[in-house]
Image (spheres, rainbow, N blue to C red):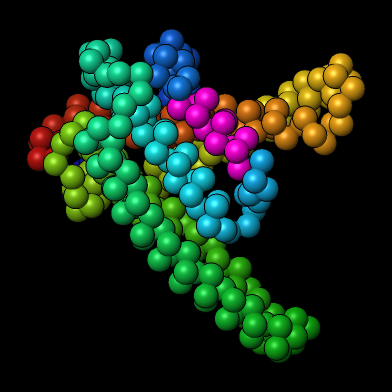
């Protein structure tokens, strides 16, 4: 099955990634239309978090609530975008600009379920890495066994990170099925991505890196605008810069998020053309 699917589908990582961003540009009007309300909500939530001193680098109850709220406000645009990618403009014909209905809450539920294997991999991976690191430190890095344990910790970290990405990426097809209001299961999602796993990981990494570059560009622009605003208003740069940075982070985050949704929508379309019998059972 895996070999047949891989042979039946042409899925060049770089070209598919470029096609995803090109598609977003061509459909920018729809993206702006359905993305403006969630984006504004995410930016305002970030402002609220900053106002109550929520540190995004430290786990806390407030950060958890803030992250959940951001996930919820992105639900409508994500569901709509999947439907646009798969069905074209007809997929969004009767969709409100912002709605939280049955499909959106079901989507959130499956998002949370997808985080379970991710959390499991994280816990196991970090635990083993810590143990190997402790052995390396106890023996000393100048000792042969210490060096062996240090190398083992590095190799294991690479192994579990790649494994975690592979599993989560392959299971992410359930989100496409939920958005299309199709029957959903992890087994179906796993079967649909047979032979495509590592290419999906590669495309996901490329999109994530592109999103990071876009984020850096927004950070630079935010610094320039923030500096100009601070000078114009005779305010402290430290006081105004975070708000411009949070706005830039909101834009880059939405672009990355939608690019990934476009990628998986493309995969669904490819499967529909190359293996219609596989998509038909979903």
202 and 230: which is toward the camera: 230
The quadrant in which the C terminus is found is top left
| Residue 12 seen in the current view | no
Q: Position of residue 259 (x, y in %)?
A: 45, 29
Rendered residue at 75%/81% (across/down)? 141
Residue 233 drawn in magenta: no
Magenta span dominant secondary structure: helix
Rendered residue at 45%/27% (across/down)? 38
Rendered residue at 21%/36% (across/down)? 102
Q: Position of residue 16 (x, y in %)?
A: 42, 28
Task: From the viewer's perspective, tell me whether residue 106 is left or right of residue 133.
Answer: left
Q: Position of residue 258 (x, y in %)?
A: 44, 29
Residue 46 drawn in magenta: yes
| Residue 241 seen in the current view | yes
Instruction: Examine the rendered structure and indicate whether residue 188 appears above or below residue 20.
Output: below
Rendered residue at 36%/59% (across/down)? 116
Q: Which residues fall within the magenta stretch?
A: 38-49
Task: From the viewer's perspective, tell me whether residue 227 is left or right of residue 165.
Answer: right
Instruction: Examine the rendered structure and indicate whether residue 168 appears above or below residue 243.
Output: below
* Residue 212 placement: quadrant: top right
Task: From the viewer's perspective, tell me whether residue 67 is left or right of residue 243.
Answer: left
Instruction: Examine the rendered structure and indicate whether residue 224 appears above or below residue 167.
Output: above
**How many dots with numbers?**
0
């Amino acid at each position: 099955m895996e070999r047949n699917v891989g042979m039946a589908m042409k899925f060049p990582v770089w070209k598919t990634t470029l096609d995803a961003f090109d598609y977003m540009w061509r459909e920018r009007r729809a993206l702006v239309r359905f993305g403006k309300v969630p984006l504004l909500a995410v930016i305002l939530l970030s402002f609220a978090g900053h106002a109550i001193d929520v540190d995004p680098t430290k786990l806390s109850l407030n950060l958890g609530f803030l992250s959940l709220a951001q996930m919820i406000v992105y639900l409508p645009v994500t569901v709509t975008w999947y439907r646009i990618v798969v069905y074209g403009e007809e997929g969004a014909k009767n969709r409100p600009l912002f709605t939280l209905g049955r499909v959106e809450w079901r989507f959130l539920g499956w998002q949370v379920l997808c985080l379970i294997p991710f959390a499991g991999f994280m816990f196991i991976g970090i635990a083993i890495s810590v143990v190997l690191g402790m052995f390396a430190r106890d023996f000393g890095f100048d000792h042969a066994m210490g060096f062996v344990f240090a190398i083992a910790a590095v190799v294991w970290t690479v192994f579990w990170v790649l494994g975690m990405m592979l599993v989560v990426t392959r299971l992410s097809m359930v989100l496409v099925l939920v958005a299309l209001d199709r029957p959903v299961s992890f087994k179906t999602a796993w079967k649909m991505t047979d032979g495509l796993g590592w290419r999906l990981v590669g495309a996901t990494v490329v999109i994530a890196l592109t999103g990071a570059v876009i984020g850096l560009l927004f950070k630079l622009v935010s610094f320039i605008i923030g500096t100009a605003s601070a000078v114009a208003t005779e305010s402290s740069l430290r006081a105004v810069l975070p708000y411009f940075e949070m706005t830039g982070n909101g834009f880059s985050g939405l672009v990355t998020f939608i690019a990934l949704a476009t990628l998986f929508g493309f995969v669904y379309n490819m499967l529909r053309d190359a293996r219609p019998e596989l998509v038909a059972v979903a």
